[in-house]
Image: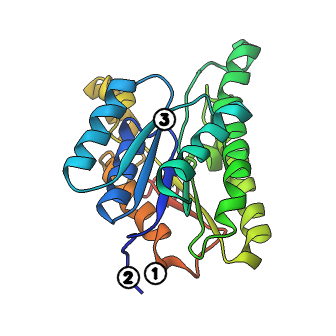
Amino acid sequence: MNDSLIGRTAVVTGGSGGIGAAIASELSFAGAAVIIGYGAHKEQAQELAETLVKAGGRAQIVQADISTADGANKLVQAAIQHFGGLDILVNNAGITRDSLFLRMKEADWDAVINTNLKSVYLCTSAASRYLLRSAFGRVINITSVVGLAGNIGQANYAAAKAGMIGLTKTLALEFAGRKVTVNALAPGFIATAMTAVLTEDDKDKLLRDVPLKRLGLPSEIAYLVRFLASDQAAYITGQVLQVDGGLSM
């Protein structure tokens, strides 16, 4: 067994930047054809796809609102139309609308639940008929340590990420008979656009409880996604791997 993904096709939601872009890149470097799903950042998505193609990969961008069934189906069908199949689904798309629970607006609750959790149901539902036919079916959900421990001001986000964990374990049980594995990664504080705007003082406060005393890198999430998508991880399913520098110990 090896970690080559040559001949396989992956869909990555929220793939235009940050963790999603790192995942799309890593899967492409391993040989997979990649559909890069995005919501609003077309230029970023296009630049990423062009970079991967220039490096010898196969990549297509697809704009889709994956909080709707039509959007999820559009993303999955792009994989079938462009690359002839689907083997790997990475549910990475996510947004935040932070507020203390007593001040949280229903619209902000709905937006986060729909984008972060409902989209996982819709995309996995749309992809399942192809994944269950694949000899290498993989579903990899990007949740968060917030889904395990909660976080003040993020009731909507924590609820969505915790829901992803429950869905991961249930799908792992239901899909196991067809040799499709379903796992989740729970990142901690990762160096993305959201953390880039923080002051050094804010970063110090964030890292106070992180034993490794640094932010994680998007590539450190992407490496694990590549592993879970490979033959080497064929006996791993229903797991939530915490990538948080020891934060949740």
> Which of the 4 image quadrants contains residue 75?
top right
Q: Which residue is mark 3?
A: 62
Q: Position of residue 157 (x, y in %)?
A: 63, 33
Q: As rendered, which of 233 and 42 lies closer to the eye?
A: 42
- Which quadrant is home to the N terminus? bottom left
Residue type at tag 3: Val
Q: Nearer the viewer, residue 232 or 134?
A: 134
How much space separates mark 3 and mark 2, taking CA atoms? 29 Å
Q: Which residue is mark 2?
A: 2
Asked whether the beta carbons under mark 1 and mark 2 sit within 8 Å of each other, the answer is: yes
Three-letter code, disc 2 = Asn
Front in this rendered view, residue 246 or 80? 80
Where residue 108 sits in the image (x, y, percent)?
67, 18
Percent coordinates x, y for residue 62 in the rendering: 48, 35
Amino acid on which disc 1 is placed: Gln
Q: Earlier in the sequence, mark 1 or mark 2?
A: 2
The residue nearer to you, when weighing 10 against 80, is 80
Q: Label 2's element?
A: loop
Give the residue at mark 1: 232
- On screen, 144 above or below 238? above
Mark 1 and mark 3 lie on one chain; the one further toward the N terminus is 3
Query: Which residue is depicted at the point 59% across and 21% down?
Result: 97
